[in-house]
Amino acid sequence: IMGPSGSGKSTLLDSLAGRLSAKVVMTGNILLNGQKKNLQYGGVAYVTQENVLLGTLTVRETVTYSAYLRLPPTLTKDEIKGIVEGTLMEMGLEECADRIIGNWHLRGISGGEAKRLSIALEILTRPRLLFLDEPTTGLDSASAFFVVQALRSVARDGGRTVISSIHQPSSEVFTLFDDLCLLSSGELVYFGEAKKAIEFFAKAGFPCPSRRNPSDHFLRCINSDFDKVAAALRGSLRIRHNQRLPDPLMNMETAEIKAMLIQKYRRSEYADRVRTRIQEIISITGLTTEAPKGSQASWWKQLSTLTRRSFVNMSRDIGYYWLRIIIYIVVSICVGTIYFDVGTGHTAILARGACGGFISGFMTFMSIGGFPSFIEEMKVSRTWKNWETEF
C-alpha cells in the first residue's frame, strides 16, 4: 500500500487488520478467503512502525521468551529451540543472535536488524496473514532492501500473505513487491500487479522516464505537495510567469492529474482483472481460516517466563538495578552511623521515629525510579497482547 503522507495508508491497513478505534465508523466489507470472518490471533500478525523491544536482552533471548509465551505448552524445550533457531535463520539474524538489542546507553544491533527482529517475533506463530506499517521507515537503502527481501522470502517460502504500507521505496525495493495499491487522499488510484503500474501510467498519458524510480514518478503524479513547490518556483524572481517549468508535470495541477488517473483506472483492464479475481476468490469453497485463539501458553507458564525475563532485564540495567543497590548500601551505612547507639531512653523515641520516617520516605522515592522499566515491559507485552484482546 503506497501513497504520500496523509493518503490513508495506515488507516486502510488498520481497517484490514481490525485495529481501528471503537469510535471509528467503518463501512464496507472485509472478506477473508471470500467469506466474512473475524481475524483471529494466531492466524494474523501485525508489525508496528515502532520497534518495541527490551534493549538489555539479546536477539535470541527476545525470540525465545516470546516463543515460551505464545507457543503451545505441549512443545518440548528442544522443539521450541528448533522453532526459535528456524525463525532467526528465516529472518537472517544468525550473526547478531547473541548481541544485545541496545538502548539509549547500550550499543546494540542496527535499525534493520531490529526491524527484522520485530518481524521474527510476529511470525513465530506462523500466521497466514502478516500486516506491516511502513517497515522501511528510518532505514538506509541497504537495510530497507534486506528487510523487504526477508518479507518476500516469508511470503514465498512460508505461503503467507504479506500486506505492508510503504511511503516511497527505492527502485530495488519496489521491484520486490508483487501487487501495488496506490492511494491519494483516501482515493484508489491504482490496484494491481506492481510491474503493470508503469504500463498503466504510460497508457494514461503520464509515462515514467527511463531513468526515474517508478515509485518517485507515481508519487510525483498524485502528491499535492508538489503544487506548492511549483507555486513557490513561479513566485520566485528566477522564474518568469510565462516560462514553462522543466518538469512537464509541474505545468499541470496534481488534482487534475489524479482525477484523470482515477477515472482511467476505473475504466481500465487492470480494474477489470481485479474485479474478476475477487469473484474467483469468493467462489472458491473449502478454504479454512481457523487459527488458535489467544496465547497458547498456560497462565503459570506466562507468569514464570515474564518473571525470568524481568529479572534478566533488571540485572543487566546498571541504572535500574546495580546503581540502586549501591545507593541503598551507602545510605544504610550513613543512616546506621548517624543513629548508631542512639540509646533506649525517652529522648531516643524521637530519634527512632525520625530514622523510620527518613527510611520510609527514601524507599518510597527510590521505588519511583522503577517506573520507566515497568512501562518499558508493559509496552512490550501490549505489542502482542493486544491481538488476543481485540480478536
Image (tube, rainbow, N blue to C red):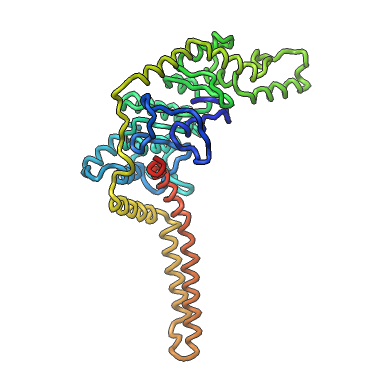
Q: How many marks?
A: 0
Nearest the eye: 73 or 391? 391
Nearest the eye: 251 or 271? 271
Judge whether residue 30 can be spotted in this image. yes
Judge whether residue 10 can be spotted in this image. no
Residue pushed farthest bottom?
A: 345
Q: Is residue 238 above or below residue 333?
A: above
Q: Residue at x 43, y 65 (%)?
A: 326
Q: Residue at x 48, y 14 (%)?
A: 271
Compared across the picture, whether 263 is left or right of 55 comes to right
Q: Residue at x 47, y 21 (%)?
A: 180
Residue 12: image location, x then y, percent: 50, 30
Nearest the eye: 38 or 93? 38
Q: Is residue 347 above or below residue 261?
A: below
Residue 281: image location, x then y, percent: 37, 20
In the rendered image, the quadrant that contains the C terminus is top left
Name the image quarter holding residue 385. top left
Residue 356: image location, x then y, percent: 46, 77
Name the image quarter holding residue 278. top left
Residue 132: image location, x then y, percent: 44, 32
Name the image quarter holding residue 193. top left
Q: Is residue 389 above or below residue 363?
A: above
